[in-house]
Each structure stands twice: as C-alpha cells, then as structure tokens.
Image: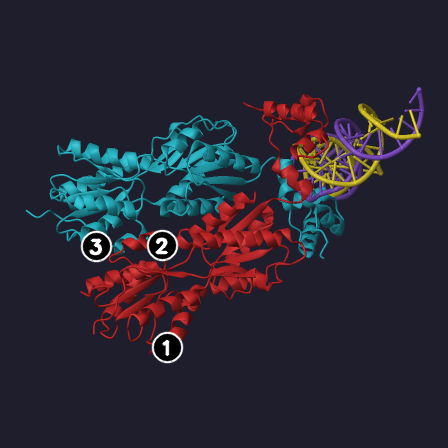
Chain colours: A red, B cyan, C yellow, D purple
Amino acid sequence: MDTERAPVMADVARLAGVSHQTVSRVLHDHPNVRAATRDRVLAAVRELGYRPNAAARTLATRRTRTLGVISFNTTLYGPACMLYGIEQAARQHEYFVTVAAVGTLDRRSVLDAVDRLRDQGVEGIIVIAPQTSAIAALANVPSDVPLVAVGCGTHAALASVAVDNEAGAELATNYLLDLGHRTVHHLVGPRSWLDAQEREAGWRNTLEKRGAEVPEPLAGVDWTARTGYELGRRIATDPDVTAVFCANDHMALGLLRALQQAGLRVPEDISVVGFDDMPETEYFGPSLTSVRQDFDELGRRALRLLIEIVGDPDAGPQVVEEAHHIVIPPNLVVRTSATRPRP
Amino acid sequence: MDTERAPVMADVARLAGVSHQTVSRVLHDHPNVRAATRDRVLAAVRELGYRPNAAARTLATRRTRTLGVISFNTTLYGPACMLYGIEQAARQHEYFVTVAAVGTLDRRSVLDAVDRLRDQGVEGIIVIAPQTSAIAALANVPSDVPLVAVGCGTHAALASVAVDNEAGAELATNYLLDLGHRTVHHLVGPRSWLDAQEREAGWRNTLEKRGAEVPEPLAGVDWTARTGYELGRRIATDPDVTAVFCANDHMALGLLRALQQAGLRVPEDISVVGFDDMPETEYFGPSLTSVRQDFDELGRRALRLLIEIVGDPDAGPQVVEEAHHIVIPPNLVVRTSATRPRP
DNA sequence: GTGGGAATTGTTAACGCACACAATCCGGAG
DNA sequence: CTCCGGATTGTGTGCGTTAACAATTCCCAC
C-alpha cells in the first residue's frame, strides 16, 4: 500500500536546500528571509504538498487552537443555531471547534463532557446547557479551562451570553395587554430551565406592574409541541382565557392545534404569542406573533467572548466581571395570531 | 499567576519512584506490571491530577482519534439530527468530532472545509452535504483521508449512508393512489439536492408504473415553508388537484397554510403527504402524514461505517465497495392530512 | 548453588515543530 | 584593506509521549 509518509519540514528543507528553521520562518512570515530563499521554500512546499503537523506544533507551542462546545441536544432549533454561529465565528478566528453532546444534563454527564474536552486539549469551552443543574455542575470545574455559557438565562454564575428573557416576556405580555386583554395566560416551559424561569418571571412581573390579575400558569415538562398541545387542551376548557403567551414556538404550535380542535379560533377567540421566532412560525395557522431571539448572534458573541478570555491570560474564568455577562435584547415580531379581544 | 505547569508523565514517574515507561505501561493496562507498582503509579497519577497530553500522544502514535464532520447548514432539522447521532456514536467509539460548517456548497468552500479538517489531523470525514455539487467536489479530494457522505441521496460516488428516497416517495405516492386519487401532484425540493431529485424520480416512477397521469411538478428553490407557501398558492388555483406529495415537511407546512388561506380544506378538498416526519408535524393543522426517516440512526450508521474504513487500512476510501453504500428504508407515518377524494 | 527463561523495569531514540542561540554573510565606514 | 553591525541562515534542544530494545530481577529446576 501507500506506505510513503507525509512530508515533514525536514523534507521541504532538503528539497529547497535550506535548514528546517528557514522553512519554519517562511511559513510564519518572518521578515528576515531573502525573497529568493522564500520562493524556493514555497516552491518546495507546493511540490511536496507539505502540510504542517498540528500535533507537533501543539506540542511545541502548547496551543491547540481548539475550542469545545458542550450541548445538551443539538437537535433543538436554538442549540443548533447557536452551534452554527459558534462554528462560523470560530473559523473566522482560526479556531477549531469540537463538540460534545450530552444526553442528560445531570452533573455526571456534564462533568464527563468537560473532561473529554480537556483531555483533547481544548483551550476553552462554550456550554449550551440551559438547565439550572448544568450550570450548578459547571460552577466547580477546575479553573484551568475558561468556560462560557450561552443561551442559558442571564443569571448564570459563569461568563455568559444570553438573550434577555425577562425583557422578551415583558414585550409579549405588554403587547397583549395593550391590545386590550384583561390579562394574559402563560404556558411555562420546563421549570428546570433558566429560560423558562426567566420568561415566567418576566410575564408575572409585567402583569403585576400593570395591575392585571395573575392567572395560574401551566408548566410543561419539556418544550415540545406535544406538551403545548396537552396544556392547550386544558386552556381550551377555560372560558376566561383570551390571550396566551407561550414559552416557545413549539409549544405554541401545539396550543394552536388544541384550540383549533376545540373549535376555538385564533386570534378571534384567543390571541397567542410565542417565543423564539423560528423560521416556520410565519406559516403556522395562523401566522404566529413571536419574540425573536437571534441564536446565531448569540453563538457568535459567545465565541468572541471566549476568545477574549482565552487570549487574556490574566483573568481567570472564575473572575466573572461585568463585561463577562452579555445580554442581548430580543424583539417582538408581530404577525396575525394576536388581536384585540372581543367586547 | 498560576505558572505551574500541568504534571507530565515524568512527574508521575518521579513521585512513584519508577521510570516514565512504567507509568505509560500502567496507563495502557500492559500485563507485565507488578500489582504493587501499578498501585503506586495510580496513586501518583491521582495525587498529581495527571492527564496525558493528547498532542504528544498523537505525535508518537500518529493517531488523533478525531473525526471531522462537514455540514452545509447544521441549523436544518435533518443535519442537526445527523450531527447528533454522529457525536453520540463517536463518543461510544472513543473518537472526538470536530465540525466544519460551510455556508455555501460550492466547490471552493467544501474543499476548504476538507483542508481545514485535514490540517487538524482528522482521521476521517463525514459529509452532510446533500447537493450534487458538493458530492462532485468531493470526488477528487486526496485519498489519504477517508470520506463518508450521509443523507445525500443514494447514488453518490462515495461511501455513503442514506435513506432510500425513491422508496419513500413511492410509499407516499402509492398511499395516495390507493386512497383513490386519480393522480398525485408533487412539490419538488431544490433540484440541486440529490434527495429532491430522488424523491421526484420515485414519485414519477410510481405514477407511471400505475398508469396515472404525471402532472407537471412544481420545483422549489429551497426547502423552506416559505417556498412551500408560494408553490401552494399556485396549487390552490388548480381545481384538478386532489392530492399533493411534498418533498419535505417544511414545504408541506407552507402548503397547508396556502391552501387554508385559499379556503380549501385538508384533507377534505386536498390530501397532503410530507417527507421527514419531524417531531412537530403531528401538530400541524391538520396532523401531517409523512415519510419518516431516522436521521439519528443515519448519523450513527455513517460514523460506524467511517470507523470501519478508518480502522481498515487496506481499503482506500475511493474503493467504494458494495458494503460502503448503506441504504436505510423509510416508512410512512399515517396521520390525518390525507384521505379518499370526494366522488 | 546455579543456569535459564520468564517477568518486570529502565534506557534510548523517535515523532515534527518552534524557539534560543550561534554562525555566516553582506555592505559600507574608517 | 579591514573591521563593524545588521541581515540572513544554521544548529541544537525541548515539548510529552510511545515503542524498540536492553537490563535487571525473580523463580524454579537441575
């Protein structure tokens, strides 16, 4: 078979008639290399198809230029987008990203994932793990690898990048109240997620601030349409409900379906607002008004923050300064799923 | 700051009073090590918190235990799931996975991604890149790194794992014909994707086989609900249409919306069948009958195939044998969006 | 007790690159 | 013509691990 080994720097040097060090200099754009020499080296590089060995470079420089991403479930729309944003930004900054998906968010698996990544030598880790338990587990990882949490609520005890969930919930709730609804019901996401908690808080605070009655919220076990559907069937039996704010778009989809099956019309009978603004929400029946969060941007910002921390050797990751909490404001995308209540 | 370096094998050896080679032996479960020695070494490892340096190991063994995944857009449901399946399986086999997202599928960016991954030393690459152009670009990458395409149609010129698109389209088309529809219309996905082509072919072949008229298909520019909606508005104006097979679920969602807006009822006036069976389709209005493909499994199979090729040094990746084309049969999930036509 | 072989441990040399330092070259001032 | 300083190039070593080989120890049969 092809037992011929990949060419190494010494091979290039020999072919170009220089020392390996000169080859290294050319490769690193060192200034003091005669133009003729540089050309000869580059020609040799091309001829041999030489590519530097990453492991050797890492061993010598102690830098892997690799970052890790831990994600709970990259299948969900939000995490998938953030991962995409992270990868984009990483490429720009000439970093590699290796992913570690965890099936469950218990302490063990999260710490395992961190370990795997550390074994591989990542210089920093971004965590897409919105559950409170995950954040807790992360609090006491060895401090030799910087951590950034992304999309995990805004009150994490780590450097973090997140959308302002409370502001988003406030936007949605105010919008519905402004339309004239007496109050707004709420489908809460799974309460083990910070995002669900914060959205619920934002909703509740807004109602209280405006002196509206705070109805009992319905909490889901997960973020799926199925859960939205099941809670929706209960909503449908309550004649008092005129407006519902859903913790995310999937749940809203399930809710829409349940209401429709119950013979209720949206928005004529009940107004609905979602959260996330996934690309499909515009085509729900009816088109869903939703709070938009820019997951892509979230991912990019997280990566930039991490690189800043990594490149900045003085500040340890545990030193969570003001600047290490980035909060991005959401905005409301108005479509047709909400309207003023019937008199 | 904490300038103390991470402990290395020599440190462990010194503390345990043995040579570094003995440490290495213990770490690799080499048989000929006295139990007492092993214990002393393990104790030293624990005490120092020693973790082997991946770069050094790679340099010595010439193995990175890292695989690359190139994906067009990890934001889409299919790719996201496959990536997830891949990562799961990789972990099981003790491989790392690093991702390279490409924004566009032109030759350049795909080859760039391959290069980046090779620079990092991946032992093999899985490509989630369903466009024909991507497959073409991949045909002539240097053969020193094994490639596997996943979810990219079944006729790729590479080792591949894919769902049987034609069979899936046949399933859907036959189902609608069996319900009594004279013929079935089709919303084609973007024709630059193999999957779209294969689904269209399956649909067309089935109609021809059964002697049904083959109506002009409507081709989309992408897979989005928006496109489905736009094509759907045209479908809605054609009184002959009684059944539509959509190339994917997102397009079906857009179609449902367009039909509803046109005052047509599904399934009473028009039956609709989708493809993919995403988790939400059950909650569309109405609940969508769809062809299910198990993306997760696709990813896992792709990884296993790749590991087989990587671990098998004799067969080059270009040697695409029978066994290197894995085709997974889809199945139809029947819900309520299709029924027999009105007389 | 002693030779022989297996079990156990140590020594040394890669692996491929970067960095510190030494050596050489060149042109112009003296 | 000689010497000096900067530009250019070469030499040697370290990074932390594995693997080939050498050395030592141990145990038992003779």
Which residue is identified by label 1?
Answer: A210
- Position of A25 with respect to A262 (left or right) is right
Evaluate whether residue B33 shows in this view: no
Q: In this view, does B27 lie above or below B114?
A: below
Q: In which quarter of the image is the N terminus of chain B?
A: bottom right
Q: How crowded is the residue under tag 3: few (<14 C-alpha within 10 Å), some, or many (20+)?
A: many
Tell me the chain of label 3: B
Amino acid of disc 3:
Pro
Amino acid of disc 2:
Met
Tell me the chain of label 1: A
Which residue is identified by label 3?
Answer: B286
Q: Which circle, 3 or 2, is nearer the viewer?
A: 2
Query: How far is the residue under mark 2 from the one under mark 1?
Result: 29 Å
Residue A96 position in % (x across, y down): 55, 44
Asked whether the residues under the numbered discs 3 and 2 touch, taking CB atoms below 8 Å apart as contact, a structural biologist would say: no
Q: Is mark 3 on a helix, strand or loop?
A: loop
